[in-house]
Image (spheres, helix red, strand yellow):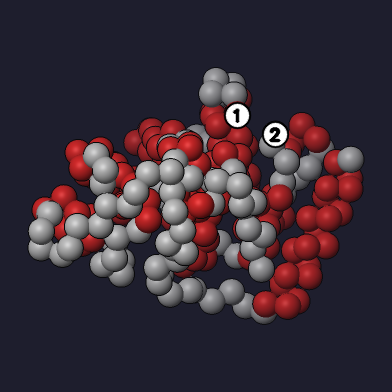
Amino acid sequence: MSRLVLWLLTLLCVFSAALSGPDEPEALDKRDDNLPARVPYVFPPPGTDPIADAIRARRTNGTLLDLDGVLLNVPLLAQAHSNLFDVIRSNSSLPPTMRELIILRVVVLTNASYEWIQHEPVARMAGLTTEQLLVIRLAPPFFASQGLNFTAVLGADLVAAMTFTDWITQNIRVPDDVFDSLRPFLNDSQLVEAVGTAASYAGGRLIVALNVDDKMDVPVPIPM
C-alpha cells in the first residue's frame, strides 16, 4: 500500500508540474462562496463596530470573511481570534514555508476544507510549490512509518515539520525524537511558535463544527 501511495504522489507531482509550469503567487482575493453556516453571519457595516473594523483592517482585502461573520456572533471571541492569528500569521519568526506547511497539514488532518481554500494562495506566496502542496495534501498521516520519504520534495526541515504536525494533531503527545528533529532548524522561540501554530489551527474544528461557508462535507481540494 505504501508503494502505491508513493507512486500516486510521484505521478501527481510530475503531472501537476508539467501542466502548471512555474508556480506564480496568486492574488489574495476573497475566496468565500457566502453559503450558509449553522449560525447567521454578522457583518456590521464599516464604521459601526470597532471590533469588526479592526478585523477588516487585518484582512488583506479589507473584507470580512465568512469565518469572521460567524465569530462576530460573539464579538469578544472574534476579537480574541483575530488577535491570536495576527500573532501566529503576521508576527511569527518561523520560516514562512514551514509556517504554511504546518497550517495546511493541520487543515488536511482535520478536513477543514474552508481553511485550505483560504490558505493555499498564502502558502504559494510564502514559497511552497505545487509539488510540495501535493505532498502536504496527499501523504498519509505518519508517512515515515509507512516507508515514505519526501525529503527530495520538501527538504529535511519541512519533513521534520510535517512529521511533528502529524503527531501533535493526531496524537497530541509528541515523541522526543520527533520534537528533537526540529531543533536543527529552529531556536527555542521558534519551537514554541511551531507548537503554537499547530495548536491554533487545530481550531479548524470550530470552522467545521459551525459549517462555515457550507464546507463541512467538502473534501480538502487537491492542489493543481
Instruction: Say which quarter of the image contains residue 194.
Output: top left
Q: Tag on residue 97?
A: none
Picture mark count = 2
Classify the position of the C terminus by image quarter: bottom right
Q: x, y percentage for residue 25?
A: 49, 73
Along the polypeptide, which appears first: circle 1 or circle 2?
Answer: 2
Q: x, y percentage for residue 151?
A: 69, 49
- Does 12 appear above or below 216? below
Q: What amino acid does circle 2 point to?
A: Phe
Q: x, y percentage for residue 167?
A: 59, 29
Badge 2 local density, few (<14 within 10 Å), some, or many (20+)? some
- Does 106 appear above or below 55? above
Q: What amino acid does circle 1 point to?
A: Gln
For image coordinates 60% across by 39% down, the residue present is 109
For image coordinates 89% across by 48% down, the residue present is 4
Instruction: Say which quarter of the image contains residue 131.
Output: bottom right
- Does 134 appear above or below 189? below
The front one of 88 and 190 is 88
Question: Marks 1 and 2: which is nearer the front?
Answer: 1
In what element is the residue under mark 1?
helix
For image coordinates 43% across by 43% down, the residue present is 38
Classify the position of the N terminus by image quarter: top right
Q: Is residue 45 visible?
A: yes
- Return the residue at label 1: 170
Q: Is residue 163 left or right of residue 56?
A: right
Instruction: Say which quarter of the image contains residue 174.
Output: top right
- Return the residue at label 2: 142
